[in-house]
Amino acid sequence: MAEELVALSAAELSEKLQSKEVSSVEVTQAHLDRIAEVDSQVHAFLHVSADALKAAGEADGARKLGAKLNPLAGVPVAIKDVLCTSDMPSTAGSRILEGWIPPYDATVVARLRKARMVPIGKTNMDEFAMGSSTEHSAYGSTRNPWDFERIPGGSGGGSAAAVAAFEVPLALGSDTGGSIRQPAAVTGTVGMKPTYGGVSRYGAIALASSLDQIGPVARTVLDAALLHDVIGGHDPRDSTSLTEDWPSFAEAAKAGIAAGSLKGVRLGVVRELGGEGFQTGVSARFQEVIELASKAGAEIVEVSAPSFSYAIAAYYLILPAEASSNLAKFDSVRFGLRVNPPGGGTVEQVMAATREAGFGPEVKRRIILGTYALSAGYYDAYYGSAQKVRTLVQRDFASAFEKADLLISPSAPTTAFKFGEKLEDPLAMYLNDVATIPANLAGVPGLGLPMGLAAEDGLPAGLQLMAPARQDAKLYSVGATLETLLEANWGGSLLARSPMGKALRATESEKGAQS
Ligand code: GLN
């Protein structure tokens, strides 16, 4: 029974909860047991909530009273540690915030609670969301559930691994340059970076404010849409929050599942997001998806976005510039760590000692890069040029969207790499975000979903769909159609074929045989 519950999608759990076949306390206990069983190996969580069962009991209580509840009421959800939670430490994977409990909830967290979802814990991440592997977490790496020797992607590797290891059906992530979509790609999960401004950033510990977006992490497109419906929409506390009403993303996903066809959809294959530098098995799977989509009625067009070739370079000036400013608040005075140099010191010396001890090497590297790029003599040459490239990227998107409704590409150039493989070479690590960064620079939404296993290593490869700003619903409907077509070929979900998915099914059928 417990194994069965953790194998279910959030939509399936929702049905069982609504029909009162199971209680939220049972569902939550099953996931807590699963975390206790496997997280010592996976290390997806930095903190497991002591109040999860209480929240579950409250959701059950509300249901008993006949309250009209959100479809996800009673469903457990994990929260990336970059989001402020008033009842759990929020460290952003950094020593400088070790043990820090914020005085308030991020808006997205408050919305989870309002929907009576059950926050089950905080997930591991690269320090301040800088990285593509979780190797930059101050609290140790998370392991990829497909192969414990490999990275789960980053920075949101904890959220992706928790979902892929069936520790929780849903999680929140943040995506500044790919931290939702790249982990989704390498763990065989689904992740969405919404349109910039579509989801509140209030209470998200900022990395680069003009690029950051919070979004859902799930095992199915419909589940991601259900969670997006809970967290999205205007928030007066975020000055960049869009004010419009959004359609139901879950309805869009359901329509996509029902459609079974892609007739009338123009899919643009981006020439610059493929070919050289992309792993053979990833490119092969991508070609198959294109053929599948074409058979399902989609019109495939080739589009070119020449400025995408400069996107990484521009990103690694804009991001460090904004990050260096956002991280200035960790000054040893207001909150977090304070280190006093031996024999005391001036304010500046205490600040320097604190930042020296509290920040890891990648964070220091980016602060140095960012302050350099912003310094008076270099501002125009570096930051100014990067902003110009950003405009070109936006123009390339605009002209691509004249020819295509959605753009399609692999979401990462490779499958999961081994621990240590790129740690000593920051540039190699940065290159893993080549396909995801353009969407952040332009503020457009991007959905990542599994597209099969690469032949050479048997590891998941990720597909990305991108839409014009505000057209998130279209991603969910086309994404759900593609997912349905792909799963028909695979004979079920890709994650069921992972070692942990297989083990789960084996225990289930053993128990079935016993009873
Ligand atoms: N890997 C990218 C980086 O290191 C993406 C980070 C993110 O999206 N938070 O900057």
Image (spheres, grey):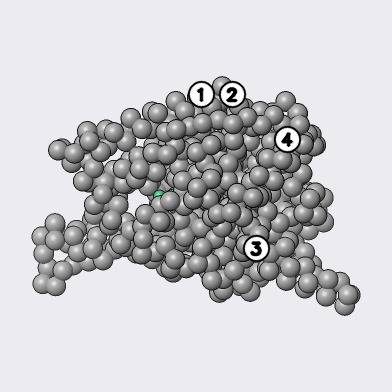
- Helix, strand or loop at mark 2: helix
- Helix, strand or loop at mark 3: loop
Amino acid type at mark 2:
Lys
Q: Which tag, 2 or 4, sits closer to the chain's start?
A: 4
Residue furthest bottom in the image: 514
Q: From the viewer's perspective, is residue 302 above or below residue 185?
A: above
Separation of residues labelled 2 and 3 (CA atoms):
35 Å
Q: Label 1 near label 4: C-beta < 8 Å?
A: no
Q: Residue at x 24, y 52 (%)?
A: 368
Q: Label 3 near label 4: C-beta < 8 Å?
A: no
- Helix, strand or loop at mark 1: helix
Q: Nearer the viewer, residue 473 or 337?
A: 473
Q: Locate residue 60, reporting x and y percent.
A: 71, 54
Q: Which tag, 2 or 3, sits closer to the chain's start?
A: 2
Separation of residues labelled 1 and 2 (CA atoms):
7 Å
Q: Which tag, 4 or 3, sits closer to the chain's start?
A: 4
Q: Label 4 near label 2: C-beta < 8 Å?
A: no
Residue 115 showing in the rendered view: no
Q: Residue at x 15, y 37 (%)?
A: 376
The C terminus sits in image quarter: bottom right
Q: Locate residue 431, reporting x and y percent.
A: 43, 51
- Helix, strand or loop at mark 4: helix
Q: Label 2 near label 1: C-beta < 8 Å?
A: yes
Q: Which residue carries the number 1 mark?
A: 399
Q: Residue at x 54, y 71 (%)?
A: 149
